[in-house]
Amino acid sequence: MWFLDSGLIIFVLPAMLFALYAQAKIKSAYAKYSQIAARSRFSGGEVAKEMLRHAGLGNVRVLPTEGHLTDHYDPRRREVKLSAPVFQGNSLAALGIAAHEVGHALQHASGYAPLAIRNAIVPLAGFGSQAAFPLFFIGFLFSAGTGSLGFLLMDIGIAVFFFAVLFQVITLPVEFNASRRALASLADGGYLQGRELDGAREVLNAAALTYVAAMAVALAQLFRLLLLRNRH
């Protein structure tokens, strides 16, 4: 049966365990450093606005958004969206996360190539993540009886899933670069100093690990599909 195949055990399950570990790391780091206030007493929202102003990006708005750890930059609206604890809070975690999202706005303004590529393939990646597995497993079930049609559906499923994998791969340099920009801006602006930067760095490194885990899961799923296709 496909749901008990060796690819699931060899590739997917270890990747999913790694993803659970990454989620635990970000929750732990955030919980720790959200309790430590920055000496500058700036809130995340204030830091984001100041950084954007100094970068000449006054046209980018900084707005609160609902949810927990839902912070993001919207390139279409040119808005930095910060969750309430980050927007209003003055913790090391809040400032680190706010600066990271500003980092994405800086990438967008400078035409940072990996971000442009990632934004361009979002529709294909979304379609690939939704359609790939239904296409593949319909083909998998039909391949024994219909032959070429079943294999064609499996191949199409793998092809469209490739864009979901590509999205995760390109996300890594985008996120790491945004964190580097964030830490440099926090230090240059004096928003965080000395060991405070280490706390913000730990939060951002933990967040980056979740993106590494997401890529690992996507690659593991791709390897599993390829293994099933070649063995069937």
Image: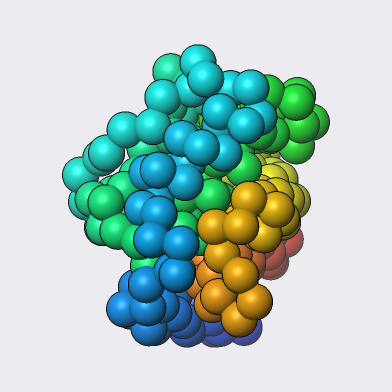
Counting from the top left corner in percent of width and height, residue 129 is at 48, 43
Residue 183 sits in which quadrant? bottom right
Residue at 46% x, 35% y: name it: 49
Residue at 31% x, 48% y: name it: 87
In the image shown, does 209 or 219 lie closer to the viewer?
209
Vertical side of 82 occupied by 110: above or below: above
- The quadrant of the picture occupied by the C terminus is bottom right
- The quadrant of the picture occupied by the N terminus is bottom left
In the image shown, does 17 or 176 lie closer to the viewer?
176
Residue at 64% x, 77% y: name it: 194
In the image shown, does 51 or 61 lie closer to the viewer?
51
Say how many tags the image has.
Answer: 0
Residue at the far right in the pictured view: 113
In this figure, which colouring scheme has been used for the structure? rainbow
**Taking 93 as reference, is 197 left or right?**
right
Residue 167 sits in which quadrant? top right
Counting from the top left corner in percent of width and height, residue 162 is at 66, 43
| Residue 118 shows up from this direction | yes
Residue at 25% x, 40% y: name it: 65
Counting from the top left corner in percent of width and height, residue 90 is at 35, 61
Counting from the top left corner in percent of width and height, residue 179 is at 65, 56
Vertical side of 24 occupied by 145: above or below: above
Residue at the far left in the pictured view: 66
Residue 109 sits in which quadrant? top right
| Residue 229 shows up from this direction | no
